[in-house]
Every structure is written in C-alpha cells, then in structure tokens.
Amino acid sequence: MQIASDGALSTIVIRYPVTRKVFSEIFTRLSVEFNLTVVDSAKAIQAIHAVLDVSLNETIFAFEQLSERKQAETRIELLNLSAPIVPVLEDVVVLPLIGVMDSYRIAHIMNNVIPRIAEKKVHHVIIDFSGVLTIDDHVALSLQQIGSTLQLMGIHVVIAGLRPDLVQAIVHSGIDMLDTESYATVKQALESVK
C-alpha cells in the first residue's frame, strides 16, 4: 500500500467522498444513456459504494498494521539506544543507562544487553547512571540483579554517575549496594579499572 507522502491517513480517506460523488454522477449519466430502471441504477450505485467501503476498510487496516510495525521498530530502536554498550578499552565497556528505567527496559537489558556484553569477553563493565531520570524500588532491585548477573559471569562491575536523588531512591528501597564499587563520574570509574 502506498502511504501518502505526509504519512497521514486523512489525506487518503478524504478522497473517498469525492470518489463516491464522481462514480455516482457517472453511473447516473450511464443509467440515463442506457435507459436503466431506477432499481437497476440504485443497485449499481450501491455496488460501487460497497466496493469503495471495502477499499476504505482495507486502506485503514493496512495503515494501522504499517503504523504498528513502525511503532514496534521505533520501540526496539529506543530500547537499544537507552542502554548502548560502549567499548572504551580492550576489556572495558561502559553501559550508559538513559531515560526512565522501567521493567520493560530492565527486561531488555537482561535479555539482550547482558548476552551482548558476555560475547565481548570484557573484564569490566562501568554502569553509568548519569542519564537515568528516575528509579523506583522495583527498578533498583532489578538493577542490582543486573550487576549480580554480570558479577556471576566473572565481570567486574563498577557504578558511576549516581546523583543524590537516585542514591536516595536506592537507599529507600532497602537494597544494600555498599559492596558495589561506585564513582561520581565515568572518568573516575575508568581510572579505577585501568
């Protein structure tokens, strides 16, 4: 299906009433020219309207499918951008966390990012929280699980960029992260693992 250049469904749908009117006028003229009965003429016009209704429904359905597919692709792209793996040294990567951390993003990190980190065979991961907007209790626990998972894989985990409000949220959640090595900046964390 060809989508309108501006991507708006309304630019396609707006043509249907005009198309109905044109077809009705053409069929009325043909009905007069061929001496069709009023009943035959009405049936023909109803058939044309039925075809246009089917076309309109199929257009809307195809547009919705295309739109849903684009939204899903955008969500995946945003997820990948919200937790990229940034190699900084041969055996060190930075995992900058960006935006609001919710259970959907945590699941993405657990299911997609951690396996990619494991494939890189790195020894150190610096998890950078400076781009995180908020953390709730559930997310704080999940982030601790991410760190624990990496540590169980033999990877040294260092945390950087925790702002005071994020630290308060983590402390408020009751999670003990005192054993976790943490630094104010990624630069300080990077110097500690060299």
Image (cartoon, helix red, strand yellow):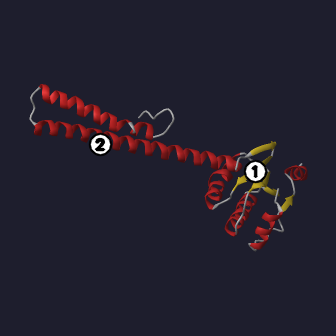
Numbered badge on residue 53: 2
Q: Which residue is mark 1?
A: 96
Give the amino acid at mark 1: Pro
Residue at position x 19%, y 31% from top?
A: 28
Above or below, comparing residue 176 to residue 162 in the picture: below
Numbered badge on residue 56: none
Percent x, y of residue 63? 43, 42
CB under 8 Å between callouts 1 and 2? no
Splitting the image into 4 quarters, where does residue 155 fall? Answer: bottom right
Residue at position x 9%, y 35% from top?
A: 37
Which element is circle 2 on? helix
Mark 1 crowdedness (10 Å alpha carbons): few <14, some 14-19, many ≥20: many
Percent x, y of residue 21? 28, 35
Work out which quarter of the rendered image holds the N terminus and state it. top left
Pick the residue in front: 92 or 74. 74
**Label 1 vs label 2: CA separation?**
50 Å
Mark 1 or mark 2: whose residue is earlier in sequence:
2
Pick the residue in front: 156 or 65. 65
Residue at position x 80%, y 69% from top?
A: 168
Percent x, y of residue 29? 18, 28
Mark 2 crowdedness (10 Å alpha carbons): few <14, some 14-19, many ≥20: some
Q: Residue furthest top?
A: 33
Splitting the image into 4 quarters, where does residue 103 fall? Answer: bottom right
Relative to 59, is 106 on the left or the right?
A: right
Which element is circle 1 on? strand
Percent x, y of residue 77? 61, 45
Count of number-bearing discs:
2
Relative to 110, is 97 on the left or the right?
A: right
